[in-house]
Image: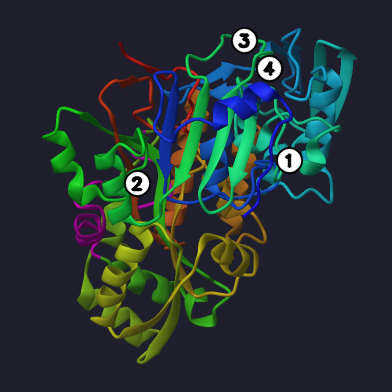
Amino acid sequence: MTHRFLTSAAVLALIAGPALAAPDAITLGMVLEPPNLDPTAGAAAAIDEVVYANLFEGLTRFGPDGSVQPALARSWDVAEDGLSYTFHLVEGAQFHDGTAFDAEDVKFSLDRARAEDSANAQKALFAGIEAVEVVDPATVKVMLKAPDGAFPFKMAWGDAVIVAPESVAEAATHPVGTGPFAFADWVQGDHVTLAAFDGYWGDKPALSKATFRFISDPTAAFAAMMAGDVDAFPNFPAPETLMQFEADPRFAVIVGSTEGETILSMNQRTPALADIRVREAIAHAINRQDIIDGAMFGYGTPIGSHFAPHNPDYIDLTGLSAFDPEAAKALLAEAGQSDLKLRLALPPPTYARRGGEILAAQLATVGIQTEITNLEWAGWLETVFKGHDFDLTIVSHTEPMDIGIYARPDYYFGYQNEAFNAVMEQLETTSEAGERSALLKQAQEILAKDYANGFLFQLAKTGVANAKIEGLWANAPTQANDLTGVKWLD
């Protein structure tokens, strides 16, 4: 196991205490352990679940209602032609290693993220940047290739946090940010601990310490909550037990929405899946409600495209891919696929493992056989996301309003549609709200009618917490466990 520590004696004292939370400390459960702790060089949602708004900060940030709020940029101005943003930075901020934060760090971070050799999983967020100019230590100007009304939104992603050249090389295992909490230790396979940072520039958090414990087994998660070994499990993996918690006054059950479009991703590099008739057949073979009931115990909202139902621009397109096994069989026959066999790779979350078994049975009823392979998260990222070595997989895309991933030329599911790309390009340069809404609706329809993937359900956020804890997010506008407003009630 790997242990890494800050040299501060205060931090060492904080982590030497008992496992149970003190009134100013909290232990949170998480299903997945992050593969690293650098959100600027990793695609796993678990990274942001630990560090977003806690350890790292960006120019902007998402609030609990999904709004874009100031962060390291206290304000910004947009040029009349929309081709530049001038960000006015907070002053007096410092990184956890004592180095000062200023505009040079912003330029370094944005240039690093958009560089040709960038390892950023969301490099497309920065593709519209023409240049970054340091005006003075507290002001940075970002020039764009074309107007982009969504630029502050893009800068709120976890992938856009600000890092420092002095410490970024070790960010994967010893992250250094400007947030209210500093990295304390990581015992791999068990937990990550953060401790309140005395030199934080903003409002001090009520918590002195936060420990994220990794518990992937639903039964073990239930036992840990009941025993008080964890104080909260914001994304609880055993929804079948929520009724027990609701009946127990010691706990609060927190149910909200997420940005997690849960999809059956189809690798269109696989010859059979390049045929729209096969993709449509698979879509009609899926009974979404059975998957929601069987895998999520009723928690989840059916979707017909890659878009969150709580978004005001959402349109319900589930009818285009309604459950219709006979239509599925006819489409497979028309495509000449009488004995189709596909590989189904499943990552660890319960929605994937439980949902995958149900979905495999549904596909079998229309004549599609599946070979299931269960992968750990690191293996899924390497084999499926990076290696494209799969036919089908189930995963929740938890990034905020990420419909643009379907325009990426080498994204893991290999979707290509010039009409969709054109809509995305137009969206990039459109700032008027009504026009953007119309384009987003058009994009949803293209994906639905092209059966780009099997659209299953919007992942619900089902959490359990000690009833004396206040401030945990009910909804998840981004993949985060923001602890900046969390406290224990007296």
Looking at marks 2 and 1 on the same chain, the residue that comes earlier in the sequence is marked by 1
- The x, y position of residue 188, in whole percent, is 58, 51
Circle 4/circle 1 CB separation < 8 Å? no
Tell me if mark 3 has few (under 14), some (14-19) or many (20+) residues whose alpha carbon lies within 10 angstroms of its own. some
Please give the name of the residue rendered at 74% of the width and 29% of the height, measured from the top-left corner: 7
Q: Please state if 468 lies on the left or on the right of 170 as rendered.
A: left
Q: Residue 459's mark?
A: 2
Residue type at tag 2: Leu
Density class for disc 2 (Cα within 10 Å; few <14, some 14-19, many ≥20) is many
Name of the residue lying farthest toward the left: 247
Q: Which residue is mark 3?
A: 202
Look at 49% across and 35% down and name the residue there.
211
- Which residues are drawn in magenta? 287-310
CB-based contact (under 8 Å), mark 2 and mark 1: no
Disc 1 residue type (three-letter): Ala
CA gap, disc 2 to disc 4? 30 Å
Residue 183, how many percent across, how many down? 64, 32
User: Hey, what amino acid is under mark 3?
Assistant: Gly
Give the answer, above or below, for where 415 lies relative to 445: below
> Residue 270 at what x, y percent from top left?
54, 78
Can you tell which mark lies on residue 72?
4
Residue 431 appears in the picture as rendered: no
Distance from disc 4 to disc 1, alpha carbons, whole Å, reads: 19 Å
- Callout 2: SS: strand
Q: Look at discs 4 and 3 and give the one toward the viewer.
A: 3
The reply to whether discs 2 and 4 touch (Cβ–Cβ < 8 Å) is: no
Which residue occupies the foreground of this view, 47 or 358?
A: 47
